[in-house]
Amino acid sequence: MRLPVFTLRSPSLRILLVAVACGLAAGTLVARLRGGAADTMAAAAAAWLDTLDDEQRALATKGFGDDARVGWHFIPKNDRKGVQLRDMTEAQQKAARRLLRSALSELGYAKSTTIMQLEGILNVHEAGKGANLRDPLRYYFTIFGTPAETGAWGLSIEGHHLSYNFTVRDGRLVDTTPQFMGANPAVVKGSLEGLPKEGTQVLRDEEMLAFELVNTLKGDALAKAVIAEEAFKEIRAAGEPQAPQEPLVGITYAELPGTAKSLLERLVKVYCSTMPEEVAGERLSLIEQAEGGWDGIHFAWAGAFEPGVGHFYRIEGATFMIEFVNVQPDAEGNIANHIHCVWRDKTGDFDLPAA
């Protein structure tokens, strides 16, 4: 079956004012979602843990306060926390995938599993001669604390080009960041049996909507948006526990023409859509509640204005930061065909105070 070229078919997401109903802690803007996704995720986490033997459970579980909870990265690594899919039985893998599905939207789950499959393409093109092991099953699952209605616990699902991090307190999903996705190749250039088909673009909307947005800008608006002629080499604070707290740059939402405003909203919602609808809605409601609302969000661009040459963008407001970079070649040498993109919580990743 041909794998899809992913696109957000319905950019409008229902905005839930859960933060108002549940109450926000003074001085913080992290999500406070009770039940729903948190309960589903807790049940799936407990079910997965029940499938593990003692040795696996020792690897899969850590205390909530363990330093490893805030240690994240998307690069290929020889050692990671948790238990990898490769070391699980078929039944354990199914339970792990149900846990992944419980934490994400259906679209987010589809993107994530396709990103995993892209490792198979890298393995073929590198023919085992690269510096890194490429394996679609080299993705690790870790539980911090005990999934329950009371107390604090966390979930990490991570491997090359994926890092999802969730924090739950007393049955409330209080943070869902860092949220990282990458794609190599960004656009699959050929067909290999059993792997994502030619033309697959798992992060298509994250890239193409941004091109559409920046190419609507002219004159002073474009000059304000562009912060560098050459794309930056990487996202900021990669692997660091907290997002950078630097002055906002670029053009504000308030300064954008009408079409660009709509495109920026759609682009933000694309990143939100990786998460369950209630999480996506909460993120959007927090944007609206923040001082300045949408008008205070900044959009910044660096690099080329068309695919195939390095490009970068940043979308940042009081409550969140998005960064996207595509400058590296894929395994076949196609220039700028390797994406890194992230959503971070400016009020504090991992439900910890911002740096």
Image (spheres, rainbow, N blue to C red):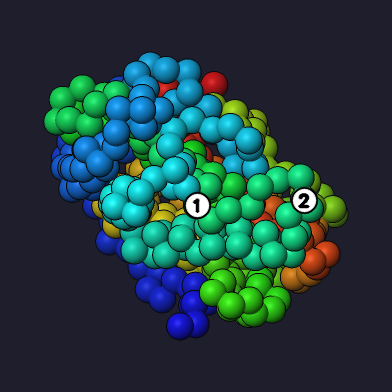
Instruction: Give percent across and percent down for residue 282.
Output: 31, 47
Instruction: Give the left or right position of residue 332, taking residue 100 as reference.
Output: right
Instruction: Give the left or right position of residue 305, taking residue 256 as reference.
Output: right
* Residue underneath mark 2: 130
Q: Categorize mark 1 by other alpha carbons within 10 Å: few (<14), some (14-19), many (20+).
A: some
Q: Which mark is residue 40?
A: none
Q: Is residue 134 visible?
A: yes
**Residue sitting at x 38%, y 16%:** 65
**Residue sitting at x 36%, y 28%:** 55
**Residue sitting at x 46%, y 51%:** 294
* Residue underneath mark 1: 137
| Front one among 27 and 88 | 88
Q: Quadrant of the C terminus?
A: top right
**Residue sitting at x 58%, y 37%:** 73
Which residue type does callout 2 highlight? Gly
Q: Is residue 252 visible?
A: no
Which residue type does callout 1 highlight? Leu
Which SS class for mark 2? loop
